[in-house]
């Protein structure tokens, strides 16, 4: 037969992937006598489609999974997607804004249904993209981070950590988002340099004679001050 002058991945890779799926070569077996190897995919957020970074990361994982199979191992590469609550809410908010609506106007129940619709659309698209990349995941075990089983495991871990005293409630400085009206992580904050001002606050001495001047860029902290420490030789 005559070979094609150029490789056509769209025509060839899909056929081979379907063949591998029919044979079940990506499926792990709990009762296998072969040495096990398990790896969970870092679940992509359902905030949109995959990008080049996902392609690179998934390819590196796929190389490791296939290499382990070639060495005779029973490999479980566990696939899944992440709900990414705040980030997903933001993209749905933007979508509603383009439609001239908002989550406040829709109401809670309608907005939650809209978010689940988004998840079904883009979560499914992400899985299709991973399959198009040729990822050799065990698709019989696909998971979503809000699946009942995973949610139950998170609650169990949280309670155990709380009982061990490793999780507790206290007062801390947090990154508060006035638009989302919630605390967000450091990863979701974009630092921005601004031109500040140096304030000098003069604290009077207890006997009323003289005072101590303290320079600060945060004068609002004065309201919480209870004392001043001064080096005796200063």
Image: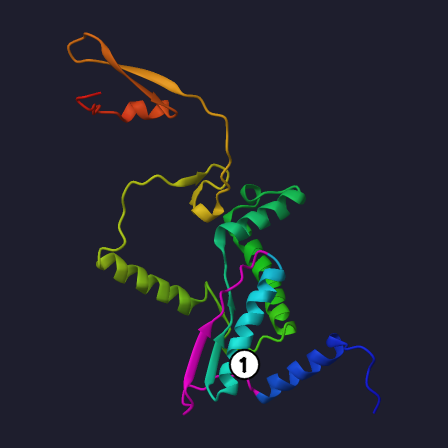
Q: Nearer the viewer, residue 77 or 84?
A: 77
26 within the magenta span: yes
Magenta residues (range): 24-47
The image position of residue 11, as x and y in percent, is 75, 78
**Label 1 crowding class (10 Å Cα cut-off): few <14, some 14-19, many 20+?**
some
Tell me: 145 left or right of 225: right
Q: Is residue 70 visible?
A: yes
Residue 34 position (above or below residue 187): below
Residue 19 location, quadrant: bottom right
Residue at (43%, 46%) from the top-left corner?
Answer: 186
User: Is residue 11 in the magenta section?
Assistant: no
Q: In this figure, which colouring scheme has been used for the structure?
A: rainbow
Q: Nearer the viewer, residue 50 or 63?
A: 63
- Residue 29 position, x and y percent, is 45, 86
- Please identify the quarter of the rendering in which residue 120 is found: bottom right
Q: Give me the residue at 51% from left, 76% from top.
A: 64
Q: Seen in the image, is 32 located left or right of residue 161? A: right
Image x and y of residue 48, in percent: 61, 57
Instruction: Point out the image quarter for the C terminus.
Output: top left
- Residue 155 vertical placement versus 230 (above, below): below
- Residue 13 vs 35, above or below: the answer is above
Quick check: can you spot residue 50?
A: no
Residue reaching furthest top?
Answer: 209
Of the 4 image quadrants, the one containing the N terminus is bottom right
Residue at (50% x, 48% y) in the render: 108
Q: How many marks?
A: 1
Disc 1 marks which residue?
66
Establish if 186 lies above or below 208.
Answer: below
The front one of 232 and 58 is 232
- Indicate the secondary structure of the residue bearing disc 1: helix
């Amino acid at each position: 037969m005559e070979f094609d002058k150029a490789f056509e991945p769209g025509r060839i890779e899909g056929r081979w992937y379907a063949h591998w799926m029919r044979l079940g070569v990506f499926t792990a077996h709990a009762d296998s006598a072969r040495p096990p190897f398990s790896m969970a995919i870092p679940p992509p957020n359902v905030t949109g489609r995959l990008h080049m970074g996902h392609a690179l990361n998934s390819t590196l994982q796929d190389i490791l999974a296939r290499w382990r199979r070639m060495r005779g191992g029973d490999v479980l590469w566990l696939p899944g997607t992440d709900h990414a609550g705040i980030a997903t809410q933001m993209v749905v908010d933007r979508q509603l804004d383009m439609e001239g609506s908002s989550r406040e106007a829709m109401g809670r129940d309608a907005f939650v249904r809209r978010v689940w619709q988004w998840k079904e659309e883009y979560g499914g698209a992400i899985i299709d993209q991973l399959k198009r990349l040729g990822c050799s995941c065990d698709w019989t075990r696909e998971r979503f981070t809000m699946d009942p089983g995973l949610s139950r495991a998170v609650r169990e871990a949280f309670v155990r950590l709380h009982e061990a005293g490793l999780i507790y409630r206290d007062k801390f400085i947090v990154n508060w988002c006035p638009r989302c009206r919630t605390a967000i992580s450091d990863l979701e904050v974009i630092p921005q340099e601004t031109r500040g001002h140096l304030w000098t606050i003069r604290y009077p001495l207890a006997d009323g004679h003289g005072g101590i001047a303290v320079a600060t860029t945060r004068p609002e902290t004065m309201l919480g001050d209870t004392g001043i420490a001064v080096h005796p030789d200063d």
